[in-house]
Structures are given as C-alpha cells and as structure tokens.
C-alpha cells in the first residue's frame, strides 16, 4: 500500500489534487443545492443530504492534501 501512495503522490501535482478535490466537493454539494432551488417546497431530500454529508468532506480532504503538497513544494523550492 505504501508504494501505491508514493506513486500517487509523485504522479499527481498539487494542482491536480486541488482541482479533483473541488470537483468531488461540488459533486456532493450541487445536487442538494439544485433540489433546494428547483424542487418542491415540502420535499425531504434525505438521500441528497446524506450524499452531501459524506462526499463533501472527502473532497475537502483532497483539497487539504493539495494545499499541503503545494506548501511543501513551495518550501522545498519545487513547482508542482
């Protein structure tokens, strides 16, 4: 498992982590927001709420990894 993590971290740049994290977080947030905007007033989107609760923190975690990678690369003098 360590080799897989190391290959992933060296293959993906910080920008790719940031973009992937933002896309993942948006895919968890947008369905619920669209339902709130265009759905019925008395609707109860339990599934969309659960999707938001589970997917958005994962996306924000990937964004955090990208930010840490960006900061470490900045201090080491590498651009990624």
Image: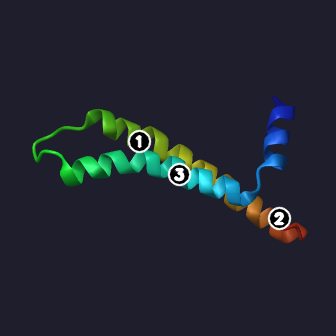
Indicate left or right for 19 with 73 as reference. left
Quarter of the N terminus within the rendering: top right
Q: Position of residue 42 (x, y in %)?
A: 10, 43
What is the distance, in whole Å, between disc 1 and disc 2 at their CAs? 31 Å
Q: Are marks 2 and 3 in contact (CB under 8 Å)?
A: no
Q: How many marks?
A: 3
Look at the picture and state if 39 lies above or below 72: above
Rendered image coloring scheme: rainbow
Q: Is residue 20 above or below residue 46?
A: below
**Residue 76, label in figure:** none
- Spatial CA span between label 1 and label 3: 15 Å
The reply, left or right, for residue 4 in relation to residue 23 is right
Farthest top residue?
A: 1
Q: Residue at x 55, y 43 (%)?
A: 58
Disc 3: which residue: 23
Find residue 26 and report its horizontal and vertical position in percent. 46, 52
Say which residue label 2 marks. Answer: 73
Instruction: Tell me the mark number nearer the camera, choosing from 2 and 3.
Output: 3
- For label 1, the residue is 53
Q: Earlier in the sequence, mark 1 or mark 2?
A: 1
């Amino acid at each position: 498992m360590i080799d897989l993590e190391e290959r992933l971290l060296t293959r993906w740049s910080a920008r790719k982590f940031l973009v992937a994290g933002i896309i993942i977080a948006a895919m968890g947030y947008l369905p619920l927001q669209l339902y709130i905007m265009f759905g019925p007033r008395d609707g109860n989107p339990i599934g969309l709420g659960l999707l938001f609760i589970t997917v958005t923190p994962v996306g924000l975690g990937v964004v955090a990894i990208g930010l840490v990678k960006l900061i470490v690369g900045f201090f080491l003098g590498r651009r990624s």
